[in-house]
Amino acid sequence: MSHILIIGAGGVSQAATVKCAMNSQVFTKITLASRTKSKCDKIAKFIKDKVGVDIDTAAIDADDTAAVVELIKNIKADLLLNVALPYQDLTLMDACSQTKIPYIDTANYEHPDTAKFEYKLQWAKDGDFKSANTMALLGSGFDPGVTNVYCAYAKQYLFDEIEYIDILDCNAGDHGYAFATNFNPEINLREVSAKGRYYKDGKWIETEPMEIGFSWDYPKIGPKDSYLLYHEELESLVKNIPTLKQIRFFMTFGQSYLTHMKCLENVGMLRIDEVEHNGVKIVPIQFLKTLLPDPASLGARTKGKTNIGCVITGIKDNKPRKVYIYNVCDHQECYQETGVGAVSYTTGVPAMIGSMMVAKGIWSAKGVFNMEEFDAKPFMDELNKQGLPWEIIEMAPNETRLIKEI
Ligand code: NDP
């Protein structure tokens, strides 16, 4: 019996809210609040038509902690799911610790003026959540999120010791545009145009953007060019799996995407500082977001599949072991079910499952936590029930699906 307050009304929110409504025995009441209330109302109508469940909607400025505190108290919410933007993580965490309700998000805090993410400021709120006798669950999307749970499952159930992890994120969907980003363009382009980084033998190694890449043979998709990026789950997994010798993250990009991004970067369109244009101050990357297709609109036209997974190498019973755990999602099937494509779906469904783990008290603790700090099994079981089934390939220790370096 939980009343969930969901903040944000983009593509990820739509998937998460639809899935909460489909689990109305857990989420007995749903309030969807965002900056633009009409977007919440549109999602509410979709849910009424598709699932037959009524949800409440509200307008909220998530940057205003006092306003969020008031909303939580007025509607008597039991937990808060943040699927707005990473900029709102800290204010929403404060609103939750002040009202003593659990907080769940899908993305690491970023300051709007600095294209850099790290857990430091969110982990620093551990004491606030402990004092409030409640918890914050960080990064309950797919990556971070399910990828952390795959690693936790491997650590808890498949290996005695984990040594190497490669996280591989492939979106083989085709939306037919020359250039579009598959989630919030500002957040996406800040992440992708940044320097790469990975962890090896106790040190973080920095790379130029897209410096390391290979063609990887993704199960049920085939070979795709994949490039090393820094990604937020690396920070918490290094902390929580201390036996790790190396962990890296790779994402697929087509040549058209990379060429457009380089060109936009070269002409200054990815700048995150203010510039003056005809007497008006604008931030180029925010202006670019206005011009690009709304990621939520890509669902209807995107065809193809995603495959996100982890290749994990380590020791079991004194012998080397290597497994590949992954999920394959079809854009059109996601769209038929929730009205959004696979990128929003693969983030929104785990956001709902994380909220379910907390609402049902299956994951229960006091303080601030990452996904891999809890028993992975109940989450893995729900993934199979809620539309993100996973598979495991047992690989020979020296077997690889790497086709060629690029
Ligand atoms: P969108 O930009 O489509 O949606 C964001 C929503 O948040 C919009 O409805 C927006 O309002 C709302 N919002 C923004 N600022 C405020 C504010 N100050 N107060 C209230 N509402 C606000 O993003 P996505 O749905 O694509 O992504 C949502 C989140 O999911 C992001 O944090 C993203 O980083 C994360 N993500 C995580 C992934 C993972 O696997 N872990 C993968 C993909 C995304 P408005 O409509 O008015 O603009």
Image: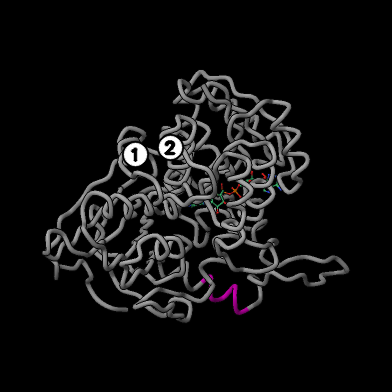
State how many labels appear: 2
Q: Amino acid at mark 1?
A: Leu
Q: Which residues are magenta?
A: 260-266
For the residue pair 324 and 76, the one nearer the viewer reads as 76
Q: Quadrant of residue 144?
A: bottom left
Query: Gap between marks 1 and 2, in whole Å?
Result: 8 Å
In this orientation, does residue 300 appear? no
For the residue pair 92 and 260, the one nearer the viewer reads as 92
Q: Which residue is mark 2?
A: 353
What label does residue 405 carry, if any?
none
Q: Residue 176 in the image: x percent, y percent? A: 45, 54
Q: Quadrant of residue 143?
A: bottom left
Q: Residue visible at 30% across and 48% down?
A: 327
What label does residue 383 carry, if any?
1
Quadrant housing the C terminus: bottom left
Q: Main secondary structure of the magenta part?
A: helix
Residue 261 drawn in magenta = yes
* Residue at disc 1, CB closer than 8 Å to ligand 1: no
In this orientation, does residue 238 appear? yes
Q: Amino acid at mark 2?
A: Ile
Q: Residue 34 in the image: x percent, y percent? A: 68, 39
